């Protein structure tokens, strides 16, 4: 369903990502792990087209998306979250989720200025969609709150909710558990499973927490210094000599 | 305390938060409608100016307060709007055609300026828009065969179907236009188009990841903003009777920017507060000048200096402008005696150094 082949990206002389290939099956939860600076985030940024790919291709659902414009990635069916949270800070949770309904809109500026009945119907319909997501992630009590007043863990959830509002087929998560406490991480693993099983969304996740990876992923890719060093189930990968070496820094 | 109980989603879609707020606006409207019966022509013309600055301010607010793009050249759009309208009127074109044409021209220019906004933000964009305004000012000054140059350009009086509007009728016309503009902009902001502006303001990266085209959205924000400034320009032309290039100088651009900042960025009611403030300010300064000893009161730079000082004081003590202050006062009374000073304090943000990583 999703395939990356020969992906490379250089920053100056440094190869942040070097000839990385992998494919994700439909319905799978696929994780990428690796030490800091391994190039994990860069892979996600290449897929979501924030960076131009130097070499290689990205295929999604039989379509080549290597050169798709960044704002068309969401329409293709790929949504993402960010390692350091990128929310619309000066708005409420509700507004953040409503903004994410943008690609599904059926109106244009002329309808919007007059706020014709069609716009009102659309507003109520998208509200229903996002209330389901709010229910799924238990965000009810934060609905009307401003992002800048929310604790870090809740912001991460809001970002996840916003990604879901795009109704993606593939969800990219960049270190979803970073900055969360153990209980929050535990909840997160259930939600990731729910999103994967109940909503049927394929997940590609960058993660540090080996426990979380073990709980939710079907397969893991290990990156070190921009190269793939291992690929397999969580248990296979954990005991791989190269992986142990990479983490111990030898 | 007053609670808003929401029983269906329409309540959140509605323009007014509750019946109470609706009544508030209705009372305000009735008050403004009846004002000309009680006040003299001076107050009436000052209020007309408030309406016109509010229209221009609404345009700039979309850009600065909702899309996060700065413009130090909005006087140029006022100028293009005013001159285009006046020139077309002079050629015998009816106002129903010339006003939309002036707005259209402004929005085209707005789109051109937005090309600069694609690569620039903050101070660089401010300088680019300033440069644009200076070019427009030069053109208006030097193209005297069309614009009259420094000698000025006489504007035909406002007429609807051959019926000339007196100042009271013009007051009502401007009030009507302002009401429509405020309705239209508020509608935009509670619909996908306006949300795209807000998204671009708060995070360009996230906006793109949620499928918002930065190029188109910025161009649209500039186009709408410039069209509204142009509209204000056409109506100002009527109000001033004569147009001079200096009526639309850099000072005007800065005043407009002050208007939206002092009113409160990201608030449409702030536009009105800001416009009232800006219209009262020269009178206020003139009054204070009389109080001061002559050696200070007669200093030529006193007015711009006070503008700057007030702007800085606002930025330091009330960054959310008059409208932010107003909200706090309202909350204080609605929650009395439970109001806590902490309510509006921002939680300490965490590091945002690595934006994409
Ligand atoms: N925009 C950039 N400019 C220059 N170097 C970058 C940029 N983004 C990432 N890098 C470099 O690429 C390497 C991989 O970074 P990253 O993908 O963020 O690692 P990870 O997410 O695995 O911790 C690092 O050495 C980093 O310094
Ligand atoms: Mg990273």
Image (cartoon, grey):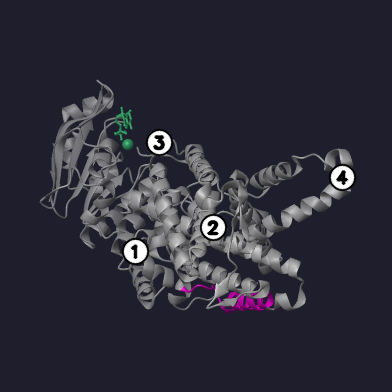
Q: Earlier in the sequence, mark 2 or mark 4?
A: 2
Direction from residue A67 to residue B41 in the image, left or right: right
Do badges 3 and 4 share one subunit?
yes
The image shows residue B283 at horizontal and vertical percentages of 77, 55
Q: Which residue is mark 3?
A: B354
For this view, does B349 lie left or right of residue B239? left
Q: Are marks 3 and 1 on the same chain?
A: no
Give me the residue at 28% from left, 43% from top: A211
Q: Are marks 1 and 4 on the same chain?
A: no
The local crowd at label 1, few if under 14, some if 14 to 19, many if 20 or more residues have their Cα within 10 Å, is: some
Q: Quadrant of ligand 2?
A: top left
> To which quarter of the image does residue A126 belong?
bottom left
Q: Compared with residue B229, is residue B336 higher up or lower down, i.e. above or below?
A: below
Contact (Cβ within 8 Å) of mark 1 with mark 2 = no
The residue that label 4 is drawn on is B292
Residue of label 1: A133
**Residue A95 got which mark?**
none
Q: What is the span of residues highlighted in magenta in the rendered image?
A: B14-33
- Chain name for mark 1: A
Marks 3/1: CA–CA distance: 28 Å
For the stretch drawn in magenta, the main secondary structure is helix
Alpha carbon distance from label 3 to label 2: 46 Å
Give the secondary structure at mark 2: helix
Q: Residue B42's x, y, as percent?
A: 75, 66
- Residue B282, compared with residue B21, is above or below; it is above
Does residue A248 appear to the left or right of A155 in the view shown? Answer: left
Q: Which residue is mark 2?
A: B82
Residue B28 appears in which quarter of the rendering?
Answer: bottom right
Q: Which dot, 1 or 2, sits closer to the camera? A: 2
**Does dot 1 land on a helix, a strand or a loop?**
helix
> Is residue B25 within the magenta segment?
yes
Mark 3 residue's CB less than 8 Å from ligand 1:
yes
């Amino acid at each position: 369903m999703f395939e990356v082949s020969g992906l490379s990206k250089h920053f100056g002389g440094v190869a942040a990502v070097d000839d990385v290939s992998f494919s994700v099956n439909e319905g799978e939860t696929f994780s990428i792990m690796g030490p800091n600076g391994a190039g994990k985030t860069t892979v996600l940024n290449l897929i979501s087209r924030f960076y131009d790919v130097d070499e290689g291709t990205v295929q999604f659902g039989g379509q080549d998306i290597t050169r798709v414009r960044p704002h068309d990635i969401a329409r293709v069916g790929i949504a993402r979250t960010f390692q350091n949270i990128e929310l619309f800070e000066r708005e409420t949770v509700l507004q953040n989720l409503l903004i994410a309904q943008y690609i599904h809109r059926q109106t244009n500026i002329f309808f919007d200025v007059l706020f014709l009945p069609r716009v009102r119907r659309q507003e109520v319909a998208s509200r229903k969609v996002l209330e389901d997501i709010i229910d799924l992630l238990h965000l009810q009590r934060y609905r009307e709150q401003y992002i800048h007043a929310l604790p870090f863990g809740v912001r991460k959830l809001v970002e996840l909710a916003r990604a879901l509002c795009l109704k993606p087929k593939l969800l990219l998560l960049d270190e979803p558990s970073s900055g969360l406490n153990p209980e929050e991480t535990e909840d997160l693993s259930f939600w990731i499973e729910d999103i994967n099983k109940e909503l049927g969304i394929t997940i590609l996740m960058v993660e540090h927490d080996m426990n979380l990876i073990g709980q939710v992923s079907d397969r893991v890719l290990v990156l070190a210094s921009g190269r793939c060093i291992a690929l397999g189930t969580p248990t296979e990968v954990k005991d791989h000599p190269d992986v142990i070496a990479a983490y111990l820094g030898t | 305390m007053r609670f808003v109980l929401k029983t269906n989603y329409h309540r959140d879609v509605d323009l007014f938060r509750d019946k109470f707020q609706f009544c508030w606006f209705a009372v305000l409207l009735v008050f403004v409608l009846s004002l000309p019966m009680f006040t003299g022509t001076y107050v009436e013309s000052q209020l007309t100016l408030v309406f016109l600055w509010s229209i221009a301010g609404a345009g700039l607010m979309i850009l600065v307060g909702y899309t996060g793009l700065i413009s130090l050249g909005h006087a140029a759009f006022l100028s293009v709007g005013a001159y285009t309208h006046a020139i077309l009127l002079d050629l015998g074109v009816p106002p129903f055609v010339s006003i939309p044409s002036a707005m259209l021209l402004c929005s085209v220019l707005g789109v051109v300026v937005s090309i600069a906004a694609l690569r620039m933000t903050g101070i660089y964009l401010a300088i680019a828009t300033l440069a644009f305004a200076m070019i427009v000012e030069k053109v208006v000054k030097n193209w005297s065969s069309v614009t009259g140059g420094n000698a000025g350009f006489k504007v035909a009086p406002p007429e609807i179907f051959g019926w000339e509007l007196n100042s009271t009728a013009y007051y009502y016309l401007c009030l009507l236009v302002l009401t429509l503009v405020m309705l239209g902009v508020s509608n935009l902001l509670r619909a996908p188009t306006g949300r795209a502006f807000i998204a671009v303001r708060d995070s360009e990266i996230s906006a793109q990841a949620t499928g918002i085209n930065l190029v188109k959205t910025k161009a649209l924000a500039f186009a709408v903003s410039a069209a509204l400034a142009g509209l204000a320009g056409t109506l100002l032309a009527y109000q001033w009777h004569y147009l001079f290039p200096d009526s639309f100088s850099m000072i005007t651009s800065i005043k407009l920017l002050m208007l939206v900042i002092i009113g409160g960025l990201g608030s449409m009611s702030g536009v009105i507060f800001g416009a009232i403030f800006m219209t009262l300010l020269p009178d206020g300064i003139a009054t204070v000048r009389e109080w001061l000893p002559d050696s200070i009161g007669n200093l030529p730079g006193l007015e711009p200096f006070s503008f700057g000082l007030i702007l800085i004081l606002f930025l330091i003590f009330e960054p959310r402008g008059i409208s932010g202050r107003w909200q706090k006062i309202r909350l204080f009374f609605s929650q009395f005696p439970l109001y806590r000073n902490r309510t509006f304090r921002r939680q300490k943000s965490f590091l945002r150094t690595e934006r994409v990583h």
